[in-house]
Amino acid sequence: MKNILKNLMAPKGSFLYQLTVSFIVGITTLILVASVVTSWLASNRTESDLIKQGHQITENLARQSTLALLYGEGENAKDAARGALAFPDVLDVYIYDTAFRLILHEGKTLEPTIIYFSPLVNSSALILDTETHWRFRAPVYSQVSQDNEFVVLNTKPELLGYTDVVLSKDTLVDTTTNIFVVNSIIFFSLATVLLLVLRFMAKRITQPLNKLSSTMYNAESSVENAYADEDGPQEAKVIAHAFNQMIKAINERDKELKNQNLSLENRVKNRTVELAEARDRAIEASKTKSRFLANMSHELRTPLNAIIGYSELLMEDAIDKDNQSSYSDLHKIHGAGVHLLSLINNILDLSKIEAGKIDLYLEAFTVKAMISDVLVVIEPLVKKNNNTFRVDCPENIGSMCSDETKIRQSLLNLISNACKFTKNGEVSLVVRPHKVNTHEGISFQVSDQGIGMTEIQVNNIFREFTQADSSTTREYGGTGLGLAISKHFCEMMGGYIRVTSVKDEGSIFTIFLPRVANNTSTSEEDDEELDDNNDDKKLENKTVVPDTADEIDHAERE
């Protein structure tokens, strides 16, 4: 029913159709409600009359059944019972003694079930109400002497028994049905006349709206001269006038839009040319930057390698000659050169990462051996701040197929940071098998007991040239490139880095890498501008970290 009403009232047909449907639904509902209410009121009135009649019949029968109950002879009440059955709706008559033993039954059906109920003195009661009938009961009292029925005693009435009368509901049902049918016929007749009148009035009201809707429909193809006639009822005139004003405004706006479109096309053409020129300049600037970085890195590496090499030779001579003063100065020169070379490598790596032209050199290696190499390099950094370093790496951790140099560089960045920011504490490296997405992998967890970071600092720690805050840079040094580069390296190999930290308690950095790396580098492209020669490529793959107490002064928080 709900779906039918929804489909009828859906805004698919004309306004006249919807108005007619609304009238039909409303009038039909009104008719049904009125018929039901009228029938219900009539039914209640009829039911009340029939119940009243049932009480009267039952009480009359009780008064006429005194002798039958006094002598226990039902024959004495047969005439009274048949008189009660003479009423149209009476079905059965019962007479019981005080023990509810049946004395007399007259009627169509004998009910085997006895209802044990005693009404009040001198009153009848409705003891059963079913869909088909009512059952009334009245008590029978007597003040007649049992020795002489014609002698009346002035004593308290004595209960002799009960009389039951079963009254049918057929008259009630027939009356209610007839009233409902008659009311429905009358209401539907009136509704038909009313609907015809409303239909005629609605048609007159909607005719101007139909003309206006036709004009609006034609305006979809062309709004020029698509004006509506301003006639009909006042409301229709107002709508037509508003529509005409809208059409006028649209025509004026169309003219303005045509002029603006012509102007915009010219501006787009000019701007497209400017953007193309700007793009070409940006591409050329990027190439120039790449060439500059490659050339400068090569030009800086050559003398730095010479300085580092000669300082190593001179340090060996100083050791042979037991010249501690010269050895100390040469050691500082060597450390500064190594540190500067590390910065140049980091800047070049970052430039290649931004250009998407950094390569992965995949090879198979054992994780345990790589960790051992890291321990040898990181030992001076641990001693610098009087820290202890703990390694937890299972013997059966196995091997990996990845870029060993970049993994080693990432671990050294994390461990050097942990050692630099921890004093008189413990730095640990825990290596465990781990699932990276659905692939077998390994996790490297570096934890410290250092200064820690706030949540805001953790969110910014992987940005290029960014450290926890300016005070960290002043106190501990560093350029803020190491963590950013390590993050890019891990993502290139199909892994990632996560960090958790508590201020003044320490930090935990964890690298998750698959055992077999996914090579996401762009080595297929021309990379000659960033790799001048084989010597530079070898230097890129060489991880440089400070290895003496003097060089530790240059360690970064990256």
Image (tube, rainbow, N blue to C red):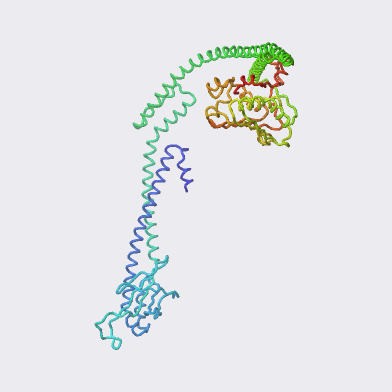
Task: Look at 46% across and 17% down and name the residue there.
Answer: 256
Judged from this view, the residue extending furthest toward the front is 322
The x and y percentages for residue 215 are 44, 28
In front here: 539 or 15? 539
In front here: 398 or 423? 423
In front here: 108 or 369? 369
Q: Compared with residue 416, is residue 117 higher up or lower down, i.e. above or below?
A: below
The x and y percentages for residue 174 are 39, 63
Question: Horizontal placement of 192 versus 378: left or right?
Answer: left
Q: Compared with residue 516, is residue 32 higher up or lower down, i.e. above or below?
A: below
Question: Horizontal placement of 518 versus 81: left or right?
Answer: right
Q: Quadrant of residue 137?
A: bottom left
Q: Quadrant of residue 418?
A: top right
The x and y percentages for residue 93 are 38, 75
The x and y percentages for residue 398 are 73, 35
Task: Look at 47% across and 27% down and name the residue there.
Answer: 218
